[in-house]
Amino acid sequence: MIELKDISVAFVAKEQTVRAVRNASLNIAPGEIFGIVGTSGAGKSTLLRSINLLERPGSGRVLLDGRDITDFDGAQLRSERQNIGMIFQHFNLMHTCTVYENVAFPLQIAGQSRQQISERVPELLGLVGLADKAKAYPAQLSGGQKQRVGIARAIANRPQVLLCDEPTSALDLESSAAILELLKEINERLGITIVLISHEMNVIKRICTRVAVMDQGEVIELGDVYDIFATPKAAFTRQLVDHTFNLELPRHLTEDLSGTLLKILFLGDSAEHPVLSEATLRFGVSVNILHGKIEYINNRPIGLLIALLTDRSDSQPSTSRLGEAVDFIRHNTAQVEVLHA
Ligand SMILES: Nc1ncnc2c1ncn2[C@@H]1O[C@H](COP(=O)(O)OP(=O)(O)OP(=O)(O)O)[C@@H](O)[C@H]1O
Ligand SMILES: [Mg+2]
């Protein structure tokens, strides 16, 4: 339903041109939660804002439901934008207005009657869990509550698409998780397509089904979140994923290692197969697990282990046995990386 075709956006400052987005293409299906991840300055916000033409691409096309809207302006553009809600990292609420007035605002703009508004606002506040906060001012709310107001306001006119620019980056872990849950609920209950930007894979993996990875203005990788986590292709993506798994070993563990240090990836069924204990029996090696983690992404497991293989003291020292053990593990798991041999 959302198609970005070969989008480029450049900003011309005094001395230099910043190519914020370079030839980016994406297709986002109706009803999905699509993530865009990348470090600061990668061009995520610029690409997101090109969907509702808050940023006009210098080249490329933007299609919604097959309609090319790239050259829309005036009334035509306003009408398209009604169909696309947006929320922001810093909420962008009107501070001198109550929660009720903030949420009522887009309804007034859309020309709804007082009567319609007085019915719709409480419904929206109920949906985001703020039924009792209608009369409060933004300053009286927590960050999480402010973002709930932002969400109620963004979906007031029943848009088909909700753009979320780092919606949880200003929140603590708990509120962040609650807001992501709320977004998921809105997606499921109302069928709204969500496009969510984050610089953290941790946020993406919680609710997104697919993700685009951006680096220096380009979409460098795109796919199912599970696949991207399981087998990231670009070095930059691997870095992001590794960061999420947080499998850094304390230095004293990696100094003076004797043996073969492996990083082993288990996917799906291989997670249940006792590969390591079998390797110890078959090849006379010892396995010492130094670090490990299992993540569930879209309910499918991804396991990562860092294990040190050594020749067992009671067996004949022979490197070939270690080599065979590594081969055996490689055959029976998704991926093995030798960190130290
Ligand atoms: N209005 C603007 N004028 C000039 N340069 C801009 C403008 N907006 C963005 N840029 C530049 O374009 C590049 C991409 O910016 P963008 O805000 O899209 O990145 P981002 O991935 O959203 O980063 P962040 O995670 O920090 O929000 C950056 O180098 C930024 O400085
Ligand atoms: Mg941004």
Image (cartoon, helix red, strand yellow):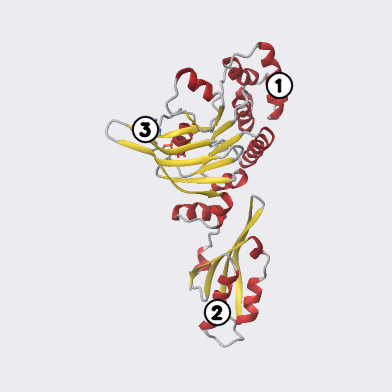
The quarter of the picture where residue 173 lies is top right
The quarter of the picture where residue 147 lies is top right
Is residue 253 or residue 12 the one in the foreground?
12
Q: Looking at the image, which residue is at 42% across and 26% down?
A: 71
Above or below — where is 228 with respect to 335? above
Residue 47 left/right relative to 161? left
Residue 331 location (% of width, % of height)? 57, 71
Q: Looking at the image, which residue is at 65% across and 63% down?
A: 271
Residue 215 location (% of width, % of height)? 42, 46
Q: Reading the chain from its start, which is encountered first: label 3 or label 2?
A: 3
Q: Which residue is mark 1?
A: 122
Above or below — where is 25 with respect to 53? below
Disc number lying in front (1 or 3): 3
* Some atom of ligand 2 lies within 8 Å of the CB belonging to the residue at label 1: no
Q: Which residue is mark 2?
A: 324
Q: Which residue is mark 3?
A: 58
Above or below — where is 285 with respect to 231? below
Q: Which mark is residue 230?
A: none
Q: Looking at the image, which residue is at 68% across and 15% down?
A: 116
* Some atom of ligand 1 lies within 8 Å of the CB belonging to the residue at label 3: no
Q: What's under tag 2, amino acid-wise?
A: Glu
If the image is split into quadrants, where does the N terminus sit?
A: top right
